[in-house]
Amino acid sequence: MTFTAVRQLMGLPVSLDLRDGTEDDAERVFAWLHEVDLRFSPFRMDSEVTRYDEGRIGADGISDDLRHVLALCQAYEDQSGGAFKAKLPGRGLDPNAVVKGWAVQRAAEMLRAAGVTRFCINAGGDVVTAGEPADGEPWRVGIRHPDDSHEVCAVVAVRDGAMATSAAYERGNHIIDGRTGMPAFGLLSMTVFAFDLATADATATAAFAMGVDGVEWAVEQPGCLVHAVDSNYRVFRSPQLPVLT
Amino acid sequence: MRRAIPAILLTAAGFAFVWQYEPTTSAQAALPPADTVPSLPAPSGGTTAPRTVDGSAERNKHGVVQVQVVFTGDRITDVRFLQLPSSGPSRMAGPRLVQETLSAQSTAIDTVSGATMTSQSYIASLQAAIDAKGA
């Protein structure tokens, strides 16, 4: 039985497409993402992230989930040579780039544990899929054209995989290169295809922050395939990326 | 000059290792221009006709590299590669990136990956149209 729904959570439109799931399955996903927002939003005065950032709770008082997220942030900061930073100078702790991928990947695992085998979650442009929407058919995931929200510039056939895109066309030049403290430049969009969304999202964000260097860097990350558009409108992609034409 | 020739050939052989280093911004392995080869300070002496000396074939993990050095007088005026592995180091396992031109695709899709959307931009987005249509 198919169930689809959209909900505004974590400041994002979250679309669920469950081909063999129910409304109850969807509600569990939405409840989890709402909980994540309460606990991890840097914009909420009483979230665990804000309390930790302001020193109201110490490192030994945080949850295992936050400890895990902070470890992921540190790993991506190290791997990207500092281009990705959850804590920029003069700013509050913002682990959002890692939290979103991690939380939505956890939601996918909750669905699998509940016996849902064919689904697609799209959280504000970050996508995780399971199985096939119909027998023999992959999920056809479009990559938004950087200039036109009504066009896609590639379509990728995905089964049990995740895709995340980082770009400046939606919220302006808000991604900061942690190495310079300046807005990232050089790329129009960076899409990463990986087995799980935590990897895809963090890799796409860090690579976009690195600018043109991020393309080769992302390709070198284990298990990651890349589709990037640079500011000269050239596309660089992994030859193994299963694009449909 | 006699002693300088082995030194120059060693320099050229050493240069093969520079060739192995591939700049991260380049999708193609470009051969370095000949004028980047360091030349030894020229001892005093007049100019003579160009003279060509072949280096020994050196094997590295990517294959065999052999250079040919052209001297004009005491100066290196050209370096050629007589043998090179058929592909650069990063291409041993196939190309890591292919370059294409940006185009719009009309294939039917189930969902859209894009930069994080706001609720306002979602309303006018392709994803909203897909959601409204249902599975």
Image (tube, helix red, strand yellow):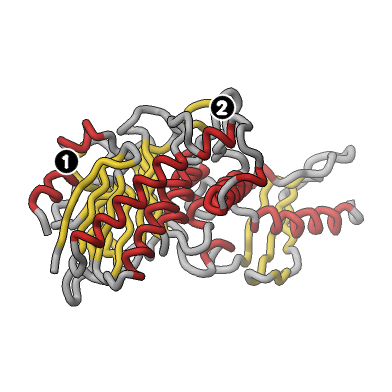
The reply to whether residue A51 is visible in this rendering is: yes
Q: Which element carries disc 1, helix, strand or loop?
A: strand
Determine the CA span between mark 2 and mark 1: 32 Å
Image quarter in which the C terminus of chain B is found: bottom left
Q: Furthest-right residue in view? A: B3
Q: Which residue is mark 2?
A: A181
Q: In the displayed structure, does residue A106 sit left or right of residue A59?
A: left
In front of the other: A186 or A134 = A134
How busy is the neighbourhood of tag 1: few (under 14 within 10 Å), some, or many (20 plus)? some
For image coordinates 63% across by 47% down, the residue present is A78
For image coordinates 67% across by 66% down, the residue present is B65
Q: Type of residue at label 1?
A: His
Q: Furthest-top residue in view? A: A90
Q: Position of residue B4 (x, y in %)?
A: 88, 52
Q: Are labels 2 and 1 on one chain?
A: yes
Q: Type of residue at label 2?
A: Gly
Label 2 vs 1, first from the N-terminus: 1
Q: Which residue is mark 1?
A: A150
Q: Furthest-bottom residue in view? A: A135
For image coordinates 28% across by 51% down, the residue present is A122
Q: Give the chain letter at badge 1.
A: A
Q: Is residue A242 above or below residue A65?
A: below
Q: Give the chain letter at badge 2.
A: A
Q: Position of residue A165 (x, y in %)?
A: 36, 46
For image coordinates 59% across by 50% down, the residue present is A67
Q: Which element carries disc 2, helix, strand or loop?
A: loop
